[in-house]
């Protein structure tokens, strides 16, 4: 179906929904690289005005990637909850935006609505929003998940403790873990990006993490962020797998480039479910995404990168994950050029994921060749925390020595928790006090916890 809008006596024509969504997107380098963006600010405004008049129901009959050619589209269509959608089924995208910003759209109402929304719907409405709109609506969404602690409660901000090491050396990894725990980080997950995807290395790291957890009697979950097929192989060898990780894309073709399909994810889900390692709940999947991955793999199908990013969340939602993380600036300036584009993308991703019912976190980051710096990280970190972000990264010194990018540190998490009166997950908060890392007020103690030092997987002198 064609869409049109006249602006300043110029009639702008958009041949289909895919083109309309792309032209309505705020400027970003990835869409420019793909050749799908608006040719001018005027065309972008015309597209946004045309998009505002599109009935929400139209997204159910016009796919941006054909149903018969893409299993992600089939998942979106086949799993749509018509009853939940009925609340907003008679409005336009513009009217939906206004409703989201109103008092009627409270936390409970938005939670009930989530299953009735498709990724294209939430992507569309986000394109009509200012940053404050994205923040205001996301802050009303509370998507709570559990494994060994409770993630996503009001007034809480969790952290992924990210102790990467360029050679997967257990001493270096353990030192970073201790450093992070002493700063109160790690309640979302202690997650290692392995330098290699070797099954035996992954099993060794998982075993080390689990041994530390048991010695510390800590209400935490761990993950080695290997490829999902490597994790399946590790489970087959009885490895202590808590969370199953995988990066996701928004099209079947791009997921194929990642070496996955929905069938592979189903296999991983079933394998991890059989382990039954959760104590408070059984949300055990961990997904990461990021705008631009589909274009970088040649699987974007001519769709703008932000709409494709939202489609990742439909895949994630299907598996009821504990954590979903937008690694917003990681792919590079070819897709998000500078701090302004990264900030917009991070708030869009967080908004779309939360509205679709996901426990959204964000790796507030940039690569060293992007037009961004630590001031941009500080800004986006603060905005996301105000918006109710579920979790952020905690990396020693904010500099990942294995992945070679800049992100948030243990200190950054302390800053934003203190600034906004946020706390870690309640079970983890109680453990921090019990083990002597914090006092009764939640403040960090100046002394090192003896129990943590005793849990090191190497003699203290070797550190």
Image (cartoon, rainbow, N blue to C red):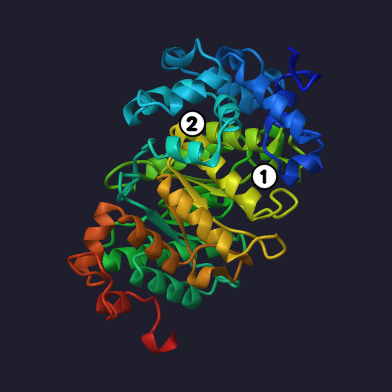
Quarter occupied by residue 365:
bottom right
Residue at the image position 76 percent from the left and 29 percent from the top: 43
Decide if residue 98 is on the left or right side of residue 416: right
With respect to residue 434, does 231 lie above or below? above
Q: Outermost residue, top direction?
A: 90
Q: Residues within 10 Å of mark 2 (few under 14, many from 20)?
A: few
Q: Position of residue 298 (x, y in %)?
A: 78, 40
Can residue 250 be seen? no
Corner quadrant of residue 9: top right
Instruction: Say which mark, if any, is on residue 18.
Output: none
Q: Position of residue 356 (x, y in %)?
A: 47, 31
Q: Residue 318: which disc?
A: 2
- Please state which of residues 3 and 352 is positioned toward the viewer in this rendering: 3
In the rendered view of the protein, which quadrant contains the C terminus? bottom left
Residue 242 position, x and y percent, is: 40, 51
Q: Say left or right for 366 vs 386.
A: right
The residue located at (47%, 39%) in the rendering is 269
Residue matched to label 1:
258
Q: What distance separates the C-alpha of mark 1 from that of mark 2?
A: 18 Å
- Residue 2, quarter of the rendered image: top right
């Amino acid at each position: 179906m064609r869409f049109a809008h006249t602006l300043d006596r110029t009639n702008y024509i958009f041949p289909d929904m895919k083109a309309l969504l792309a032209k309505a997107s705020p400027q970003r380098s990835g869409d420019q690289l793909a050749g799908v963006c608006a040719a001018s600010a005027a065309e972008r405004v015309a597209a946004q005005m045309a998009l505002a008049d599109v009935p929400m129901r139209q997204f159910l009959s016009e796919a941006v990637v054909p149903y018969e050619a893409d299993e992600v589209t089939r998942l979106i269509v086949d799993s749509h909850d018509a009853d939940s959608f009925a609340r907003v089924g008679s409005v336009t995208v513009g009217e939906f935006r206004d409703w989201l910003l109103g008092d009627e759209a409270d936390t409970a109402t938005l939670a009930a609505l989530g299953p009735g929304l498709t990724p294209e719907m939430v992507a569309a409405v986000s394109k009509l929003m200012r940053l404050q709109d994205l923040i205001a609506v996301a802050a009303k969404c509370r998507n709570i998940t559990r494994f060994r602690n409770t993630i996503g409660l009001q007034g809480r901000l969790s952290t992924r403790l990210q102790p990467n090491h360029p050679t997967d050396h257990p001493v270096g990894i353990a030192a970073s873990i201790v450093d992070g725990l002493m700063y109160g980080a790690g309640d979302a997950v202690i997650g290692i990006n392995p330098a290699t995807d070797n099954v035996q290395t992954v099993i060794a790291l998982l075993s080390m993490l689990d041994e530390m957890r048991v010695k510390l009697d800590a209400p935490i979950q761990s993950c080695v962020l290997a490829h999902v097929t490597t994790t399946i192989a590790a489970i087959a060898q009885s490895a202590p797998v808590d969370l199953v990780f995988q990066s996701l894309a928004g099209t079947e073709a791009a997921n194929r480039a990642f070496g996955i399909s929905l069938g592979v994810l189903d296999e991983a889900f079933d394998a991890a479910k059989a382990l039954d390692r959760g104590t408070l709940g059984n949300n055990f999947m961990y997904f990461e995404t990021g705008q631009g991955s589909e274009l970088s793999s040649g699987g974007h199908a001519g769709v703008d990168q932000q709409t494709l990013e939202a489609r990742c969340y439909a895949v994630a939602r299907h598996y009821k994950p504990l954590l979903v993380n937008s690694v917003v600036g990681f792919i590079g300036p070819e897709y998000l050029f500078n701090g302004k584009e990264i900030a917009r993308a991070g708030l869009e991703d967080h908004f779309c994921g939360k509205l679709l019912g996901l426990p959204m976190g964000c790796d507030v980051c940039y690569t060293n060749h992007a037009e961004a710096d630590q001031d941009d990280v500080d800004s986006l970190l603060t905005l996301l925390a105000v918006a109710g972000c579920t979790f952020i990264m905690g990396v020693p010194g904010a500099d990942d020595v294995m992945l070679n990018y800049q992100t948030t540190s243990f200190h950054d998490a302390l800053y934003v928790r203190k600034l906004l009166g946020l706390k870690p997950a309640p079970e983890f908060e109680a453990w921090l006090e019990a083990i002597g890392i914090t006092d009764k007020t939640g403040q960090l103690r100046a002394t090192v916890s003896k129990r943590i030092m005793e849990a090191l997987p190497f003699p203290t002198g070797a550190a």
